[in-house]
Image (spheres, rainbow, N blue to C red):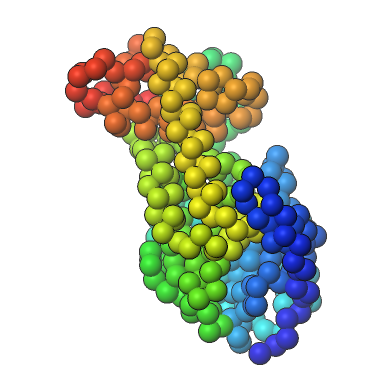
Amino acid sequence: MTPPPFGRLPEAPLERRNLVYPFGMARPADGGLAEVAEGVFWLRMPLPFSLDHINLWVLDGGDHWVVVDTGVNSPAVADHWRTLLAGPLAGKPVGRIVVTHYHPDHVGLAGWLSRKTGAPLLMTRGEFMLARVLTLDCAPEVPADVIAFHAAAGWSEADIARMEAAGWGRFARGVARLPTGYRRLRDEEVVEIGGRRWQVVVGSGHSPEHGCLFSPADGILISGDQVLPRITSNVSVYPTEPGADPLGEWLASIDRLRGLPADTLVLPAHNEPFTGLHARLDQLAADHQDKLDRLAAFLTVPRTAVECFPTLFGRRIAAEEMQMATGEALAHLGWLLHRGLVTAEADGRVNRYRVAAPGSGGAQGVAHG
Ligand SMILES: [Zn+2]
């Protein structure tokens, strides 16, 4: 086995909000690597969003490297990869590329890296197919059903005009062309990497079929965006599936992840590695439950999704956050709607939600924006 080309991060445990960060707030520099467990290397890449970084992982596969997530398609991230491939990783080839889910900061450079190294791309089917579809979905104009979806949520004419001006197909810009074919990862499948057995653990709600990797022997979870220590992962209803119940899927995934050991070392896609998985899952579930309770109390009179923003988020929503806030609001409204706790009524182009009268028989036949 090649000796590790990068230093082991020193232990410096730091406790915050019932989570323990075993390496404190230490982190590799952009484009740099640090070993967090034997053969598991933490790599940080810059992001051009308000969220300024993503964590990627490089696993020692014995005679090859396995890359987990790839960073967004940008010249800066590609430059970091070139430097790594020519330097610290030059001792052996990249043999496999695993991507947790379809978001551009994760899948962005997967196609580019696959072509550059010849390594196959491993993803769950739901994530690969959605990424492929979205990279091909470019049009000169925002589709009419997408505009109707946002109008139904209560967007103003000005908000809609801003969306139309931004155009359609932003996803494709953040993602390099994907390979035509991929290797499918299935839930509970075991992937062997350098003698370590990683079990695929699928979650849902943030994305349709998010693949995490769990090593039972070493108690390590590469969690992608399924569990983050300080950020609440976006859980949204999108125009692609207006009647979806992503929050129901998200909360079910939280229950499922509670089945992993409490002392698991979680390697998240954003922020720092931590232990305290169960405490974090409890915090996430409680945060959503709190939002649902506030919404139910607010919906004694009919309201649009946009009118629910102050109750849900407790702060002003900037123009560029409108889409995400709308998706989140619809996810919480959808959860209540699917369980018959609120009803929705179409009023012209706009949907309004209110708490269901007791014994009203639930959500059957109700329009859902
Ligand atoms: Zn994501």
How many marks are shown on the rendered structure? 0
Q: Which quadrant does the C terminus fall into? A: top left
Spot the residue most to the bottom: 1
Residue 170 occupies quadrant:
top right
Q: From where the camera sits, is residue 68 visible?
A: yes
Position of 172 with respect to 124 (left or right) is right
Please, is residue 253 above or below residue 9 in the view? Answer: above
Q: Which quadrant does the N terminus fall into? A: bottom right
Please, is residue 226 above or below residue 116 in the view? Answer: above
Q: Residue at x 36, y 16 (%)?
A: 354
Position of 331 with respect to 171 (left or right) is left
Q: Nearer the viewer, residue 114 or 360?
A: 360
Q: Residue at x 44, y 66 (%)?
A: 200
Residue 199 occupies quadrant:
bottom left
Q: Residue at x 40, y 27 (%)?
A: 333
Q: Residue at x 44, y 49 (%)?
A: 254
Position of 151 with respect to 167 (left or right) is left
Q: Nearer the viewer, residue 241 or 173?
A: 241
Q: Position of residue 357 (x, y in %)?
A: 26, 15
Q: Position of residue 325 (x, y in %)?
A: 54, 29
Q: Nearer the viewer, residue 1 or 367?
A: 1
Q: Position of residue 316 (x, y in %)?
A: 64, 21
Please, is residue 141 above or below residue 101 in the view? Answer: above
Residue 233 occupies quadrant:
top right
Q: Position of residue 124 (x, y in %)?
A: 42, 61
Q: From where the camera sits, is residue 106 visible?
A: no
